Amino acid sequence: MILPAHLNFFSIEECGLFKHGDGEPAALKAEETFDLIYKWVQGKQMEDTIPWDPAATKSGTPKCYCHDFYKCEVTGDYLFVLWKSDSDSVGTIWGAQASAQTGKSSVVEYTDNYEGKAVIWGRPCYYWVIPKLRTIVSVKLDHSVCDSTLFQEWVTKCITNRVKHPNKKKSQTETGQVRFEFTSEGDLARYAYRFDVKLRSVNTGSAHLQELSSRVTHVIRRDTIKLAAGKDERPTWVKIFDKIPHLPAKPKAKTRQIEVRAEAKPTAAEIKKIIETFAVEDRKRSDWNNVGFATDTGDVWVDRYRLHETVNFSKDDATVFAAADLHVRLFATREKLLEAIVRDNKVADASIVAAKKVIKAAAGKAVTKKSAATKNGPKISAKVPD
């Protein structure tokens, strides 16, 4: 059978240990972060790969485990099959053996009368990690789910709660925040670990974005406002609608859906930033909250312009993919799938280099002017009396 796989591409915006006020990490960049996690999950029982206390998890909040993993020694890429605990009756639920080693846990399909070994009911989440390109790719199949927020939480908690760090000391603040201390170039300092990703959009130089930029007349924002039962904490501009006849909220309503259209002519670069800020990887058609653009031919929404691909896999059944198997299939078209990202990164890196040259040149001019001012400044002489 043919299984379509939908790929969403994320850029790694932050990854590493950051000192307060610093823009660049001092350590634990993407390569080191995922290598440490890869080594940490090896040999562990699947039930032990949740990086926080499962007993302390709030009711209804999904748990996350590592079901399988793979590292490509040629490219340095990783493929993680995470396991999101889920009891939702919509779609197929799978059970992965809780006590089996990660990577060796067999999977069974949910039945009402299951009586086998203890399993964790849920669904797989496939993530292709490409540290050298600062990129994460979520792979969505019919039997799997995508949850980038849960993925970020899992990675962050692995580093802060579970992974051992040579020459680094972990401590916890009174508010529960994890801090790291380690010596860098003789300086003992405190650092906080941060990991953040966001959806990538099509390149600003693409014909799609250029055409959209020329046609946009308004930016659209849809949101859901909570109507407080006691003190009215709604923004002033929302309250204005109450004064218009027939527009007050419904009696006893707890929320209200609103839509705002602001006249605007954003550039392609500004549109790209809006898309990457507000696009969602798996938004439902029924979801109201959204951001989009009004054009001369109708409204379009940001999700349409996120960077995504669809590849078809041939498989005998629709069961869960092993990490190594899925990586082999992706590796076959790796160059084509990552072509746009490689191009984007080259443009971004070139911009950074150019900016650094400008800053360096400006700093050089400032030093030159200062030297000239000192050289040409007033000369002061003093005569020592005999």
Image (cartoon, grey):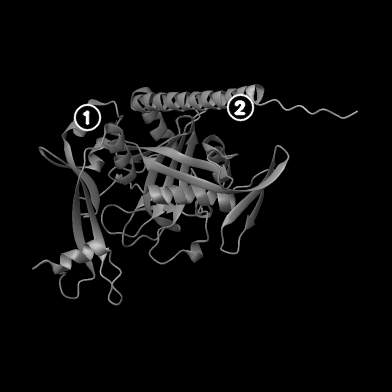
Q: Which residue is mark 2?
A: 370
| Residue beneath the point at 70% across and 37% down | 185
Q: Position of residue 352 (x, y in %)?
A: 46, 28
| Residue beneath the point at 70% across and 25% down | 379
**Which secondary structure, mark 2?**
helix
Say which of 128 and 339 sits in front. 339
| Residue beneath the point at 56% across and 39% down | 25
The quarter holding residue 374 reads top right
Horizontal side of 234 relative to 345 (left or right) equals left
One can see residue 360 in this view: yes
Q: Amino acid at mark 2?
A: Lys
Q: Quadrant of the N terminus?
A: top left
- Which residue in the rendered view is the most extreme toward the right? 386
Task: Using the image, determine if residue 334 lies above or below residue 144.
Answer: above
Q: Which residue is mark 1?
A: 208
Q: Position of residue 261 (x, y in %)?
A: 18, 49
One can see residue 310 in this view: no
CB atoms at circles 2 and 1 under 8 Å apart? no
